[in-house]
Image (cartoon, grey):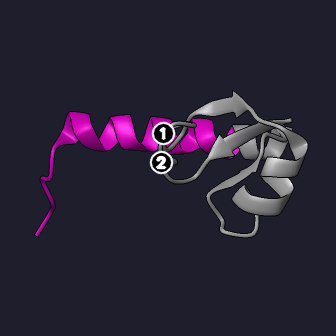
């Protein structure tokens, strides 16, 4: 089962990684602890939007209009 890691899990994946894990591990450990979500089309799209938003923030730095 493909999952998107929401947080870093030692030895498994880092935040934002999309990886294959066993279904039992995902349903019994990762999902209940909110460490990962299923890599559905909608979740993948949200991940891409998050990455684009993050890269935009890095380019602009921390400048704010005051």
Element type at mark 2? loop
Q: Main secondary structure of the magenta part?
A: helix
Residue in the picture at 82% in, 61% down: 28
- Say whether residue 28 is left or right of residue 60: right
The quadrant holding residue 32 is bottom right
Q: Which residue is drawn at 86% across and 35% down?
A: 1
Residue 48 located within the stretch drawn in magenta: yes
**Disc marking residue 48:** none
Vertical order, 43 against 52 (above or below): below
x, y percentage for residue 17?
A: 57, 34
| Label whose residue precedes the other's in the sequence (1 or 2) | 2
Question: How many numbered marks, from 0 up?
Answer: 2
Q: In this view, does 42 lie to the left or right of 49?
A: right
Q: Mark 2 points at which residue?
A: 8
Query: Pointer 2: residues within 10 angstroms few (<14), some, or many (20+)?
Result: some
Spatial distance from mark 1 to mark 2, Cα to Cα? Answer: 4 Å
Asked if labels 2 and 1 touch by Cβ distance under 8 angstroms, the answer is yes
Q: Give the range drawn in magenta.
A: 45-66
Q: Name the residue under label 1.
A: 14
Residue for point 29% across, 44% down: 57
Callout 1 environment at 10 Å: few (<14), some (14 to 19), or many (20+)?
some
Q: Does the magenta stretch include residue 49?
A: yes
Q: Indicate the quadrant where residue 49 lies.
A: top right
Query: Residue 41 at what x, y percent from top left?
Result: 84, 38
Give x and y (percent) for residue 66. 10, 70
| Residue 46 in the figure: left or right of residue 12 | right
Q: In this view, does 60 lie above or below 66?
A: above
* Residue at x 49%, y 44% (from the top left corner): 15
């Amino acid at each position: 089962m493909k999952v998107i890691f929401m947080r870093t899990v030692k030895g498994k994946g880092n935040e934002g990684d999309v990886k294959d894990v066993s279904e039992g591990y995902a349903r019994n450990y990762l999902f209940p602890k909110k460490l990962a979500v299923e890599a559905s089309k909608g979740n993948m799209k949200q991940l891409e939007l998050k990455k684009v938003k993050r890269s935009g923030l890095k380019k602009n730095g921390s400048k704010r209009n005051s």
